[in-house]
Amino acid sequence: MKNADFFFNRELSWLEFNYRVLEEGLDKSNPLLERLKFLSIFSNNLDEFFMVRISGLISQVKSDFQIKDMSGQTPGDILSKINLRVHELVKKQYECFNNDIIPEMRNEGFNFYTAKTIPEMYLESLKNLFLKKHFLILTPMAVDQSHPFPFLSGKSLNILVKIEDPKKKEIKYAIIPYPTDDRFILIPDGGNSKNYIFVGELIKLFVSYFFRGYNVLDSAIFRITRDAELSIDEEGAEDLLLEIEGQLKKREKGRPIRLECQSDTSEDIKSFLKENINFYEGFFFDIEGPIDLSSFMQIATVRGYQHLKDVSLPPILPFEFQNEKESIFSIIAKKDWLLSHPYESFDPVTRFIEEASVDPKVLAIKMTLYRTSGDSPIIAALKKAAENKKQVTVVVELKARFDEAQNINWAKQLEQVGCHVVYGIVGLKIHCKIALVVRDEDDGIKRYIHLSTGNYNDKTARIYTDLGLFTSKKSYGRDASAIFNLLTGYSEPPRWKKMVCAPLDMRNFFIDKITIEKNNALSGGKGKIIAKMNSLVDGKIIKELYEASKAGVEIQLVVRGMCCLKPSVKNLSENIKVISIVDRFLEHSRIFYFYNSGDENLYFSSADWMERNFDRRIETLFPIEDEDIKREVMNLMKITLSDNTKARILTPDGSYKRIKPDASEKKIRSQVEIYNMTLEREKAKQREKEVIKKFIPKKNPDIT
């Protein structure tokens, strides 16, 4: 079973995911700034795709690697299809940007000027700004026989200038790299409009100041994307932190993959760039507008303009966690608690670590960190805990892609204050999300645990959908302690009480669960599987799902991103339905349900159904046993599977079709429905509290 009849290619499937992101930008029913945000996200996603996935395929092609993937295609086949599809999508993106977004932005008072369109009344003030700042900062670099083409950082914006020596009549070229951190210059005009000029366009406007005595004939903005994969020798490295720091410097010098120029760039400038930049043939892009729309996130998130944005859905602090006078450990000791982000606030998770850092009864804190925020309150709490002489152990994953530098910084800071910082296990990424607090209580030592599908990041917790569980059950505490011993020392894997761990036994666990459903269906019973994840790529799991489908198991999958499984194919997967939801929040939770002859099993995990999760990462899967939480999660899944506004269904040809309600059907936008349900539940708790407070029992006259 290894051809296009059974599997989609993962890279092409990812491109269809990014198209779904783009569709939200194309969708005129979305508010204007939300549309701009999705165009920005599309660009950012595509950059990472080129830096990681495309670079890997190019390496295979250049090595004459002809082995076909499970969809039956060679790397060369896949690159050709990617090239065609990416050019199609970028064209759609800029047609939307130029024909829809910019005119509507102009109607709302946003103006974006270029060197050609800037009104004359702004020229004097802009020239003063240029001479006082940019002229002093920037450095033109000549390109000739004695000055070879300079190294240019990946994703940096640059201006190529064509100049003429008027005396010798010689044509020369120079390059001006410029910073992209603050790309938009706001031009004050005293009115209500927001008038911007791009930094690159400002430089082009006054570029002649750099070349006194020469004639400027032409100038153009361009950008290079480079290979950003790290080649880390974990086995040979004496110090993993130093090894990764060294590789980060090499990343900046990765080989060129893609070249972008603006479409009005002259042919001789394009030719000059193509001759001097050794990028992969085919990945040249003529851009009909400003290069790199990811920078427009700055505009999409501008303060105010609420009428151009989605209705605000602020995270809700659950009623049970609102009393700050009650210890969070007392709250968790009562029962297991579910937190559903971003509908519910991340504050209880932060509070969990903050209280632990100052609680005299807390002896130790152990925690995994994969990605966290720039000014993380959790990092601050861990430092405080170490300063308060608690045993603090932090497993920091240094290889979290594009967060390596930040994680190295956190690791150094934590070590400096006395935390025990561990970098995990050679050859494996630490992707599980666990926080463990050990407390000395009157009845002995007690462990409190937080397990999650997502990162300990207070910023992304506001925009990613994730589920977290607080528990103080001994069985979970024992397994959590065993995982930390596995990560930090030489401990052998134990017999797990509750959890399942990759790369030890997670794939086999899922295969066993799928097999049980298959056998139940074959024996005339009911078989049902519901699974929600980011990506479904693992060939072994897909084969098992096909066998279960053929046996009559009903399989409902919510896969936000890549999906290599072909659903709804007769005699193969006709009982499998796959939907993808792309909306204002990034779907990130991993939920797995098995009917199990009516004794229903429900699990959360940090892992997707991918080879890397099963074989090259430390991941956890844990059961949900509290019946109230089970009901709540199954209700969330019911709403998710009912989405007919932001859901798309995967068809057998690999395309996704929007699910649209019939005229008689209620429109269901699952994320908004879940938020409203959560809000109403919390309001009901508040009302109940008010009723109890107002109730004053009448005095019994028979009692004196």
Image (cartoon, grey):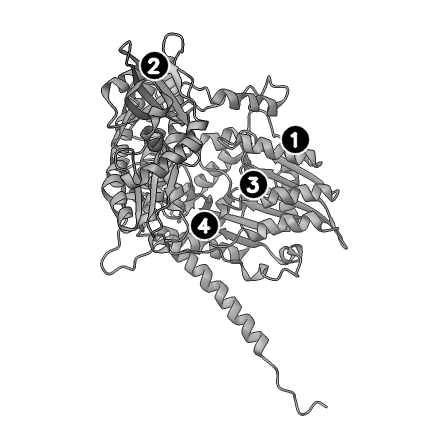
Q: Disc 1 or 3, which lies upstream in sequence?
A: 3
- Can residue 1 be seen here? The reply is no
Viewer-closest of 533 and 282: 282
Would you place residue 674 above or below residue 156 in this image?
below
Viewer-closest of 353 and 478: 353
In the picture of the structure, the residue carrying the numbered disc 4 is: 597
Query: What residue is at 26 percent from the left and 25 percent from the top?
Result: 265
> Farthest residue toward the top?
145
Residue 604: x percent and y percent? Answer: 50, 45
Amino acid under disc 1: Glu
Residue 405: x percent and y percent? Answer: 54, 30
Query: What residue is at 61 percent from the left and 83 percent from the top?
Result: 697
Q: Disc 4 or 1, which lies upstream in sequence?
A: 1
In the picture of the structure, the residue carrying the numbered disc 3 is: 433
Residue 442: x percent and y percent? Answer: 77, 55
Q: Nearer the viewer, mark 4 or mark 2?
A: 2
Q: Disc 2 or 3, which lies upstream in sequence?
A: 2
Q: Disc 4 or 3, which lies upstream in sequence?
A: 3
Query: What residue is at 66 percent from the left and 54 percent from the top?
Result: 329
In the picture of the structure, the residue carrying the numbered disc 2 is: 276
Mark 2 residue element:
helix
Q: Distance between the Cα atoms at labels 1 and 3?
A: 20 Å
Left or right: where 642 falls relative to 505: left
Q: Distance between the Cα atoms at labels 4 and 1?
A: 34 Å
Mark 3 residue element:
loop
Amino acid under disc 4: Ser
Residue 615: x percent and y percent? Answer: 50, 29
Left or right: where 354 falls relative to 72: right
Amino acid under disc 3: Lys
Q: Nearer the viewer, mark 4 or mark 3?
A: 3
Q: Which mark is residue 492?
A: 1
Placement of the N terminus among the 4 image quadrants? top left
